[in-house]
Image: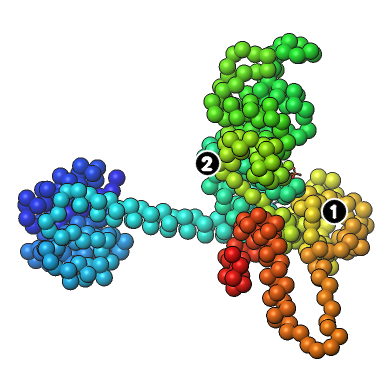
């Protein structure tokens, strides 16, 4: 509840203000003059001062000035006599939220007070978010990641921030990203950071199962529902009750399963295959796909209504090539993890090997990096992993380092800056085209921050 301090010497006015403000559900304290109000300000927290300008001793502006010294964040609405425009301007200069000119109606008072308090709340929320963000940044930098997820690049920081925000809610999450970018790890992180963490995290790989099998996997079946079903069986929805259901490769489910899934999401109810009884469960749904689901909707392979149900909170995982800063960090982490699993003594990379890893384009993302490191650890002989232990990459071209071929004209000269700018412009246009105009996607593709891309778009007058 917000608290308001009213200062008004005229009794009728004061009581009128008190009544109106209390009707708005506010906690109100009122005073006839400034000094008593300022004393009260030292004892209790207030959000807003509503003060008359003309008071017996100190005027309203002076009261506000003193109040600001006592509580720097406090807001005020100054009540002035009709025609005193200068005073109103003065009040605004001092940082007052608003002013009211006598005579005013209770409705006018209500509008101005509500606006002042809403602005105040928005400001406080903003400060809270900025502080929270800073804190998360520090935690990530210190730990080299967020829980099991390693990374300290800007793009991954955004992902961690989103995980933190979506985890406490029950809304459906759709994780998209190329194969091997860590979608499953993100799904688990959301579950682990949620209030459901003590309950099951149940995964279903939708692409691996045929339509009929997937249906009975998801919803269960009754005894005799189909040939061979000698016993009734609970489906994954039931098994995940109270927890999280992770539907991996959701882009691959058939139209029939899409319809059933939609119904569960709409009604929170379903029946086992071959069953009559309607069951209801409390499940948080997280789905993942490496397909562009929006495109699948356009191609009519995926139901639009289901897409919107799943897509409430989207998380897009950037490919590894867009988070160059993380590669070495990940390589060290994965090497340590694999050594533990293989029960071998830990080995580190020499700097040449790390450079090689950092320069490669990683079409298979973190999973490919993991495989390359495992191979190096198993096949390498020395104490440290060297370039020679990473055979796949030695002959292989590193896409990120590959330069477009360019031939200097045989005669005359070229303007290097202009040539580079033209090339940059072309690359940006291509990325935008490939991202269907989605700027965050294009920025990620280019390893740029969205703000940096905007700057370049402006510079080249694109769009
Ligand atoms: N940020 C990360 N930090 C640490 N390990 C990671 C990270 N991202 C991915 N991995 C590891 O890489 C491997 C692949 O990750 P995951 O299975 O989550 O990818 P995916 O996006 O689900 O891939 P697919 O689409 O092929 O199913 C896993 O072993 C995972 O532990
Ligand atoms: Mg996966």
Give how far across and how far down residue 313 sits, in percent. 56, 44
Asked whether the viewer can see residue 6, the reply is yes
Q: Secondary structure at mark 1?
A: helix
Which residue matches tag 2?
Answer: 168
Which residue matches tag 1?
Answer: 372
Residue positioned 28% across, 66% down in the render = 95
Q: Secondary structure at mark 2?
A: loop
Image vertical order of residue 372 relative to residue 174, above or below? below
For the residues labelled 1 and 2, the Cα–Cα distance comes to: 36 Å
Q: Quick check: 278 left or right of 417?
A: left
| Quarter of the picture holding the N terminus | top left
Q: Residues within 10 Å of mark 1 (few under 14, many from 20)?
A: some
Residue positioned 59% across, 62% down in the render = 450
Instruction: In the rendered structure, find residue 351 and report the number of the disc placed on it.
Output: none
Give how far across and how far down residue 325 sits, in percent. 70, 63
- The residue sitting at the bottom extreme is 412
């Amino acid at each position: 509840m917000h608290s308001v301090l009213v200062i008004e010497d005229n009794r009728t006015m004061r009581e009128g203000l008190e009544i109106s403000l209390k009707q708005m559900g506010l906690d109100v304290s009122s005073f006839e003059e400034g000094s008593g109000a300022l004393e009260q300000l030292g004892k209790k927290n207030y959000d807003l001062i509503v003060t008359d300008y003309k008071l017996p001793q100190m005027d309203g502006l002076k009261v506000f000035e003193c109040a600001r010294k006592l509580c720097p964040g406090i807001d005020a609405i100054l009540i002035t006599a009709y025609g005193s425009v200068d005073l109103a301007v003065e009040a605004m200069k001092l940082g007052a939220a608003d002013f009211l000119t006598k005579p005013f109606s209770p409705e006018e008072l209500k509008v101005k007070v509500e606006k002042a308090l809403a602005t105040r709340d928005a400001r406080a929320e903003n400060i809270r978010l900025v502080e929270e963000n800073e804190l998360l940044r520090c935690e990530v930098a210190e730990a080299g990641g967020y829980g099991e997820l390693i990374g300290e690049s800007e793009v991954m920081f955004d992902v961690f921030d989103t995980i933190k925000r979506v985890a406490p809610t029950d809304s459906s999450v759709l994780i998209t990203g190329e194969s091997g970018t860590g979608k499953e790890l993100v799904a688990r992180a959301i579950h682990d950071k949620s209030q459901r963490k003590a309950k099951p995290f149940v995964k279903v790989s939708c692409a691996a199962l045929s339509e009929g099998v997937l249906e009975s996997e998801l919803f269960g079946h009754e005894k005799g529902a189909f040939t061979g079903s000698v016993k009734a069986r609970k489906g994954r929805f039931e098994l995940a009750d109270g927890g999280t259901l992770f539907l991996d490769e959701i882009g691959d489910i058939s139209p029939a399963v899409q319809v059933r899934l939609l119904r569960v999401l709409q009604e929170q109810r379903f029946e086992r295959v071959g069953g009559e009884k309607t069951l209801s469960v409390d499940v948080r749904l997280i789905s993942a796909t490496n397909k562009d689901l929006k495109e699948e909707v356009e191609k009519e392979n995926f139901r639009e209504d289901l897409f919107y149900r799943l897509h409430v909170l989207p998380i897009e995982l950037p490919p590894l090539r867009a988070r160059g800063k993380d590669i070495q960090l990940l390589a060290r982490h994965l090497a340590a993890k694999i050594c533990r699993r293989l029960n071998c003594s830990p080995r580190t990379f020499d700097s040449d090997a790390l450079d090689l890893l950092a320069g490669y384009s990683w079409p298979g993302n973190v999973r490919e990096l993991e495989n390359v490191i495992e191979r190096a650890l198993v096949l390498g002989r020395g104490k440290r992993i060297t370039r020679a232990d990473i055979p796949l990459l030695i002959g292989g071209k590193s896409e990120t380092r590959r330069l477009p071929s360019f031939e200097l004209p045989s005669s005359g000269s070229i303007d290097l800056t202009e040539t580079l700018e033209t090339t940059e412009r072309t690359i940006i246009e291509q990325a935008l085209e490939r991202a269907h105009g989605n700027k965050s996607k294009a920025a990620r593709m280019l390893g740029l921050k969205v703000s940096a891309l905007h700057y370049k778009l402006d510079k080249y007058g694109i769009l």
